Image (cartoon, rainbow, N blue to C red):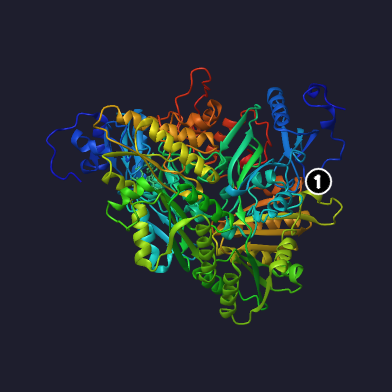
Amino acid sequence: MFGKKRKKQCSDPVVQQLITMVGESEVLYLKEELIAYECDGYTMSKGMPRAVVFVNNTEQVSEVVKLLNKEKVPFIARGAGTGLSGGATPFGGEVIISLVRMKKMLHLDLENRKAVIEPGYVNLKLTQSISDKGYYYAPDPSSQYACTVGGNVAENAGGAHCLKYGVTTNHILGLEIVLPTGEIVEIGDDGIPDHPGYDLLGLLTGSEGTLGIVTKITVKVLKNPEDKKTVLAYYDDINDASQSVSDIISTGIIPAALEMMDSIAIEGVESAAYPVGHPSDIAAFLLIEVDGISAGIDDQINEILTVCKNNNVRKVKVAKDEAERGLWWANRKTGFGAMGTISPDYLVQDGVIPRTRLPEVLGEIAEISIKYKLRIANIFHAGDGNLHPLILFDASIPGQSERASKAGSECLKVCADVGGSITGEHGVGIEKSAEMRFIFSEEEVAAQTNIRAVFNPENLLNPGKLFPQPGRCVEVKKEPEKVEV
Amino acid sequence: MISPSLEGILPKEQMRYNNEEKHLLGNGGIQIIEAYSEEDISKVLAFSNKYGKTVNVISGGTKRGYGGLIEQADILLSLAKYKGIVEHSVGDLTMTVRPGTTLKEISDELGNYGQRVALDTSWPEIATIGGIVSSNDSGAKRLLYGSVRDLVIGTRIVYPDGRVIRTGGKVVKNVAGYDMNKLFVGSMGTLGVISEITIKLRPLPKYEGLSLLHFPQGNEQAIRAFTVLLLDSKMEPVSLEILNPAITEKMTGKHHYTLAIAFEDRENAVLYQENWVKEHLPIGAEHSVLHEEEARQWWAKFQHLGPNGHHDDENDTYTQAALKIGSNNLDVLINVKAAVELAKVFHVVVEAHGGVGHGILRVYVKGFPEDIVTYIKALRKKVEEKRGYVVCTHLPFKLRETVGVWGEKPGYFALLEGIKRTNDPNRILNRQRFVGGI
Ligand SMILES: Cc1cc2nc3c(=O)[nH]c(=O)nc-3n(C[C@H](O)[C@H](O)[C@H](O)COP(=O)(O)OP(=O)(O)OC[C@H]3O[C@@H](n4cnc5c(N)ncnc54)[C@H](O)[C@@H]3O)c2cc1C
């Protein structure tokens, strides 16, 4: 990577050992090299890592981890760094283990509908590499062109098409992990279902890199649907759009995707790279996709059109070809980044609510916007009630970052208060660890950190993430237990 | 008589001394306690934890023969009366239920709203949702709809010390904290007692069809080729279940290997897919189709195959066993064949069915105890050659030790033990019911 000889010699003994282990070119330790690793896609918290080490295979991960464990140096696994909650962000002094070089497909078994890949494999590449045979990998985060499947496993990533097909955890059949001790463990035996024992696959998926480093993944792959149709519906009133969402679900249709964007979000995407020509004066649009057996799709589309019309839709249309459909999706999937065209900075939130509470919650988010004098755009997975309020601010104006953070937290409180969750797919990370208290009691947090102690007893792997610091009064202490596997 | 130490914990009418003869399936208890509420569960567990009493948990009892090396614990805690729907949010397609509610009770209620829980597990009028979740039971239609772990979005768990801990939530998408729901699905009640479950629902299908393909020559190659073709097509079967001749005979009167291929969709889409099947029919295969009520009745009958711990009859001349075999999807065909062939060698009678697209095979065995034991051992050896596993989901207590319900401990057993120790340090709950004697 940094081929030319470095001027400064590194005096850090841990870094020296890492270099001996994996080679000079595979370790970053100069400040200017480390800056890129100060944070992930969540930029409001930053910390300088001690070093970044690129690993090439499971054995190397194990060796590196053993060393760091011996030296009691905290460490963090990192994929593409697109995380939106600070999961891969150091507090300062951690060694980052980057998995991006581990990006091979190890095995493809279409008859049994599975693929075995290394963790650095990029999400979209997986689908691209099997699409010629008519298959795809279902979870499709909007960052799929960049994010790694390892990162997806750690965050239990979702995406627009998870409404019908489920999130990452529903597609993971097996994992190889390196425990914080350096031991290598194989779980799920390459995809044989329901392996006897506690569901460690389910526990590890979404554990935000705090239980083990994923070094190999067996995923389920699906056959492409025979047909799909996509509808775009423009509304003058956001409540009509929300009501349409509930009504579509009530008719018994499970759309492949059911997305919503409000007027501020539309302003953003229309001035970014993939404008569709949405009218500038609408309150919201719905992007609805139905897929499956061709013979059953027209019926469903007709029912959807009826629902939209019954809810005062201004205009509704079905994509006439793949090019139009592709444009609508590009417009949607680049939605977050598009906010950069209308605001210097933005903070993405990720609350979940029962979808029947949409109108009420969107109303409250609008109140929060007024209260904090910050514009809030909404781009979200309406079908499963997963909101993404995007709080627009300007970090160069003193006080705005703090206001944005507070507004974000308040949005999550609203979600929690209607019986929802503080995160549907982006994870807790650094960002939302305090907000965990909106939905879990101290004891419920302790029930989880106690499980962490089984895997990560000394909390060397990604410390400080995911959980709030225990409250002083109810601190639940557990003897950390060493696990010999 | 109630043991004095338990007095005052719950009203007398909820507790009784177990006067029965020892149960063929074990997993009993000296005191039987009926819980009527979460608080009851909590009181019983807190008491047991404090005084080192062991607790077995039961509801419908259909899985009483599934795991367990203790004939009688100190307490048998029954949740059968802790039932009912707490909340059904029709528009959100979610439902919260108490553990003692049977699958049938749930389905009946949801049917009124055109919805269902997408679980087609056995004995739905006896099996409770708590038991189904704890044992991670599943049916043929998991091929398309997934299994329990894909459906449970939240729980309330009474921990062994009596505290109530919530996992997950009530929304369909949620990554806040660890996915603790998963720990309790399939944990055989060894980590806590589930006192409430929130599940994702689905709309009832608009139209149901079932294509039955019979293979009079039992032609393995033809069956395999056809399933590969179907799985590689764009059809969306809900089930692709292979039935051995004995089960087919029970279900349809014909003694052939059979593929049961269900489609559930709009009527047009179902008929179109059935037509695809007809057009690709393997040579020599016979074919029949059932629709709507007929199809539903067929599946209802299918849900009543195999032994059921609730009324396993001790006087039955033969012993019964049930096995769950996991393998690579297509190895189900090899394993079903092996199950049938080995049955001849070991003089047992078997019924077997398995999902070629989902990798789970069920084998129901009848015979003399010693034959069953040798049969299971031989079949396990065969299945393990291809990295599969055999778990005994029903077996008389006396045979469980000899056979090994769960097979070998996994390499990461220390992690499982660590989790058990974390949740249930005194090992009071369903002791020795699970993998490696956990
Ligand atoms: C524009 C944009 C759009 C997005 N859209 C979506 C979306 O639609 N849905 C969604 O769910 N997310 C979305 N995200 C968030 C993000 O892309 C996902 O969380 C993704 O899964 C992160 O993958 P990554 O490879 O970048 O992981 P990183 O950011 O590098 O790491 C994320 C976490 O995973 C851990 N980790 C990474 N690799 C491993 C490993 N091999 N073993 C153990 N732990 C590991 C890290 O320690 C960290 O805690 C979006 C992000 C951006 C920037």
Please, what is the three-letter code of the amino acid marked with disc 1? Leu
Residues packed near mark 1 inside 10 Å, few (<14), some (14 to 19) or many (20 plus):
some
Q: Quadrant of the C terminus of chain B?
A: top right
A321 left or right of B379 in image: left
Instruction: Look at the numbered disc 1 and say if its residue's Cβ is closer than 8 Å to ligand 1.
Output: no
Going by the picture, which residue comes out furthest to the bottom?
Answer: B283
Give residue B9's position: percent from left, percent from top: 77, 24
Query: Is residue A201 in sight in this rendering?
Result: yes
Residue ID at (78%, 26%)? B10
Give residue A106's position: percent from left, percent from top: 39, 57
Mark 1 highlights which residue? Answer: B24
Instruction: In this rendered view, identify the residue nearer to me: A30 or B273.
Output: B273
Question: Above or below — where is B437 with respect to B328?
Answer: above
How many marks overall?
1
**Quadrant of the rendered image containing residue B244:** bottom right
A39 left or right of A427 in image: left
SS category of the residue bearing label 1: loop
Numbered disc 1: what chain?
B
Give residue A226's position: percent from left, percent from top: 48, 69
**Quadrant of the rendered image containing residue A82:** top left
| Ligand 1 shown in quarter | top left
**Quadrant of the rendered image containing residue A84:** top left
Instruction: In this rendered view, identify the residue nearer to me: A22 or B257.
Output: B257
Query: Is residue A147 in sight in this rendering?
Result: no
Give residue B112's position: percent from left, percent from top: 70, 54
Residue ID at (71%, 40%)? B69
